[in-house]
Every structure is written in C-alpha cells, then in structure tokens.
Amino acid sequence: MMKPRTALIVALAAAALIGSAWFLNRDRVKEEEPKKAESDPKLVRDAKDEDAFANAGLFKRLGTGNMDPVEPELLAHLRKRWIFAPSDLPYNLVRPSVKSWAQIGQSQLVDKILKERRNGFYVESGAFDGEDHSNSLFFEKSRDWKGLLIEPDPWTFEALIQKNRKAYVVNTCIAIGKSPERTEFTFASELGGIAKKSAAVPKAEAGSVRGTGRIQCFPILSLLAAVGQTHVDYFSLDVEGAEIEILKSFPWTQVTVDVWTIEYAVHGGGAGTAEREKEIREIFKKTDLYKEGTILGGQDIVFVRKDVPQ
C-alpha cells in the first residue's frame, strides 16, 4: 500500500498536470520588457540557461525567511511564475443568478458600509473555489470591482481557475512573517491551513484531509506590490488559524485597507475562540486606524477604518 505522504506527492503532481490544461487559458500578469540593444554574440547567453540559473538562485533565497518583500526580482518572479491575470472569458459559475455567495452575509454588510462603492479592489485570502462562500464575487459581478484571490490548496485552486474570475489569482498562502517562506500545510479543502497554526479538523470533517506538505508562501505586501496595488477597499481573511500571525506582520504603513472581515472563531466555536477575538481586537487597537470591531454571525469580526465616510 502506498504511504500517505507518498500518495499526497503523487496526487499533487497529478493535480498539477491536470490543472495545466486550464492554466493555458489564463495569462500571467503582463510585464513590459525593455527593448534589447544589439550586443556581441559572444556575450549573449542561452535564454533557457539564464532563466534556469536565475530561478535556482532565487528558489534558495525564497526559503531563507530573509528576503526583501518588494525586491524587484521577487516581484518579477511572482508575475512570471505565480500570479494569473484576470480572465477575459465568460464566468463559469454553478449558481450564476444568486445575489450573494457569502456564507454569513459578509458581502452585503461590506456593501452597506461602503455605500455601494463601485470599481473597488478586494483581497480574499482563503478564496476556496471562487464561488461557494465567496465574500468577493458579489463585488466583482455587481459593483465592477477587481481583486486578488489567494488559495493555497491545489485541488481547490483547480476549481477556482475554472470559474473565470475577473481577478488576479494565485495558488499560494500569505506568509506569517515579512519575508517569503516555506511552511508545512494541511490540505483539507475549505478547512486546510498552515499546519502549526490550524485548529484540529473536526472528526465529522476528517474525510476532507488529504495530507500535509510543504508549500511556498509570500508576504501580502509582495503579492499586492506585484499587481501594483497599495489600497484595498475590502479584505476578507479566512485562513483557518493563521489570521493573527498575518495581522501581526501586516504592512499597515504601506497598504491601506478600508474594511476587514476576519474569521476569528475556532471550528464550531471551540476552545480558543474568545482568546482569538481578544488578540485580534488588540492588534487593530494598536494601529489606531480602525473603529471598534463588530461581530458578524458569531464567526467573523469586522473592522472599518476611521476615515471611511459613514
């Protein structure tokens, strides 16, 4: 019988091969290259060798946890190898006619807070399949927003890429520090998360666990810089356990966010829920940028910047 970890590696490889067919329909983030002047042929390196050499060196640095999050080489790498540009194909949704896909009314509340703001920008970290429980799809379809969808699970990401969302999409996780890092991740569909920060998956959901593996994560500052964004109208943070660490290292002076919804509750309101709420409130209080947080549905906590018109 194949060992669980070996099975996971095989499954990941298979998922990557299957997903490649869909990825061909999506363009990477376009980046203009300067015109090249004529040069001595003796000094011209083979393009493939040069690319492989550069990537090998960068790969080593990505795992050190000590890299400038806005280093030009890193941002170019994200645009070329990781981030897919918004789709120009028609939506491919299971429920295209519903008014909102959010789980507990997040999009309706945020839309009310922002007074039906149009042409905004969102970030949804924990984007799942891009439709079920999506807190951002309403804004994309009804308010003409663009955004960034972050989903680390490769199986779920395959489903996400097929939805043809009008957003940047990336198959990674937000680093819990200020530098790119590789971390152990539990693959469990909508309940998956960074292993050392995730709560135990409930027994009733144990069937969703595929295994664990190391994945590459990037700071939110790097991901936003790669798509040229310093302001976020709405940030949905639902990463099954690592929310506090992400907030602790958030670049508050470099990125502005008008409204946050953050999942603070442990699965089923389990042990640690009250402590997580308290710690998240303390983080936002220290920024002195936000009003007192409000609870939504016993699951999310909502923060609004003080300078957002009400």
Image (cartoon, grey):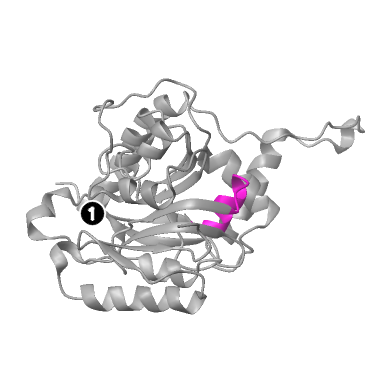
Q: Relative to 222, is 9 above or below?
A: above
Most foreground residue, 101 or 203: 101
- Residue visible at 59% across and 44% down in the picture: 227
Judge left or right: residue 46 versus residue 139. right
Residue 70 shown in magenta = no
Residue 270 seen in the figure: yes
The x, y position of residue 40, in whole percent, is 92, 33
The x, y position of residue 250, in whole percent, is 51, 66
The outermost residue toward the top is: 90
Q: Mark 1 = which residue?
A: 191
Q: Residues within 10 Å of mark 1 (few under 14, many from 20)?
A: many
Judge left or right: residue 236 versus residue 276. right
Most foreground residue, 304 or 27: 304
The x, y position of residue 141, in whole percent, is 40, 31
The x, y position of residue 69, in whole percent, is 61, 60
Residue 55 seen in the figure: no
The outermost residue toward the front is: 310
**SS type, badge 1:** helix
Residue 226 shown in magenta = yes
Q: Relative to 258, is 278 above or below?
A: below
Stretch of the chain drawn in magenta? 218-230
Three-letter code, disc 1: Leu
Judge left or right: residue 30 versus residue 82. right
The outermost residue toward the left is: 204
- Residue visible at 65% across and 58% down in the picture: 70
Q: Quadrant of the C terminus?
A: bottom left
- Residue visible at 37% across and 24% down in the picture: 91
Name the quadrant containing residue 156. top left
Q: Relative to 94, is 146 above or below?
A: below
